[in-house]
Amino acid sequence: MPARLNLTRRAAIAALCTAIGAPAVQAQGAPGPITLIVPFAAGGPTDIVARLAAEGMSGPLGRTIVIENVGGAGGATGALRAARARPDGSVMVLGQMATHALTPLVNSTVGYDPVHDFEPIGIVANAPMVLAARKDVDAPSLAAFRDFVAANAGRLSFGHAGLGATSQVACELFNVMADAMPASVAYRGTAPALNDLVAGQIDFMCDQITSIAPQIRAGAVKGVTLMAGKRSPVLPDVPTSTEQGFPELEVEVWNGLLFPRGTAPALVEAANRALLATLRRPDVAQRLAELGASAPLEAENTPAAFRDLIARENRRWETVLRRAR
Ligand code: ASP
């Protein structure tokens, strides 16, 4: 009876730990694989960095990490699933600027509090957004593209990952700047939106450089602007929004790992250590650089710093969105 044996073993270990006062079972969390919820479709920017983190962290944690893509509602469906999971270390979420700042600010029905319902672990990657268009759009500059969208808004559409997704909010900032209302098409993540942009089903979209740069380099879509203050070495020919005179379009997205609220501090610390060990690996650092992304300095990549960032970003975006409305 293997199941019973297993239970008996667990009870014996728990009794031993109680006897010696060590929280060993707690620090290890529930047995079995860890589910890492990616709140968007497979193949998009959130998914890419989640898989990098999962592959690197499973060794140091001694646990298999299984990715579960739960897209919808600008990432809120997946984030809510994580917020409601048992806080035993068996479920974490790759949260980012959408799920933990924007989506809850624009949608009061998300069902979770991004600041209080999670135990932040650390940041996996920061990456700037890119505004890209159908490859046959003839607009040699951001100003020309703005004029094109303003003149043709009734016939144009942009794709994104749902209300409050960074892909939606970044493009809405552009739409406000262009004073235009093109049709808005929601997907479960930016990977399917990018497929439709390549196929010419939609006219433009905004996405993190991590997943969109290869399509720009291949000429499958047109890189209109990097929504940043500094050019990226992975897209050296795509001018920034700031150098083209639109600094208000700078959008850098943070992507990090979180457990549900109530997860034991020992589990959070162990996951943070595994994340830092992963980011320290030269092959992982090189992969992040190839993707156009970066990780924070190790000393600044703590659970406490991530918690502060989420609170700060909620305040900052509340102001930006209020002004944009
Ligand atoms: N992170 C993207 C967004 O916020 C979606 C994705 O990763 O697929 O729009």
Image (cartoon, helix red, strand yellow):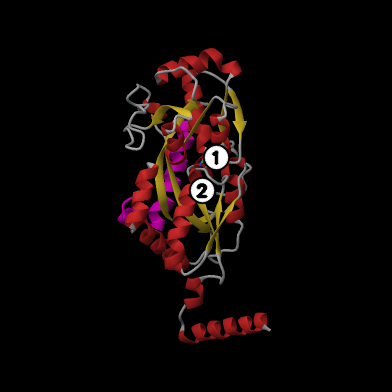
Is residue 312 in the magenta section? yes
**Can you say which quadrant of the picture contains the N terminus?**
bottom right
Mark 1–mark 2 CB contact (< 8 Å): yes
Question: Which residue is painted at 51% across and 23% down in the image?
Answer: 175
User: Is disc 1's CB within 8 Å of ligand 1?
Assistant: yes
Q: What residue type is labelled 2?
A: Asp
In the image, 300 versus 9, the foreground residue is 9
Instruction: Give yes or no for residue 108 being in the magenta stretch.
Output: no
- Callout 1 amino acid: Ala
What is the span of residues highlighted in magenta in the rendered image? 296-320
Q: Is residue 226 left or right of residue 162?
A: left
Q: Identify the residue under disc 2.
A: 47
**Residue holding disc 1:** 191
Residue drawn where x is 31% and y is 56% of the image = 299
**Image position, residue 235 (x, y; %):** 36, 34
Label 2 CB less than 8 angstroms from ligand 1: yes
The structure residue drawn at horizontal position 48% and vertical position 30%, both measured from the top left corner, is 220
Task: Indicate whether 130 appears above or below 13.
Answer: above
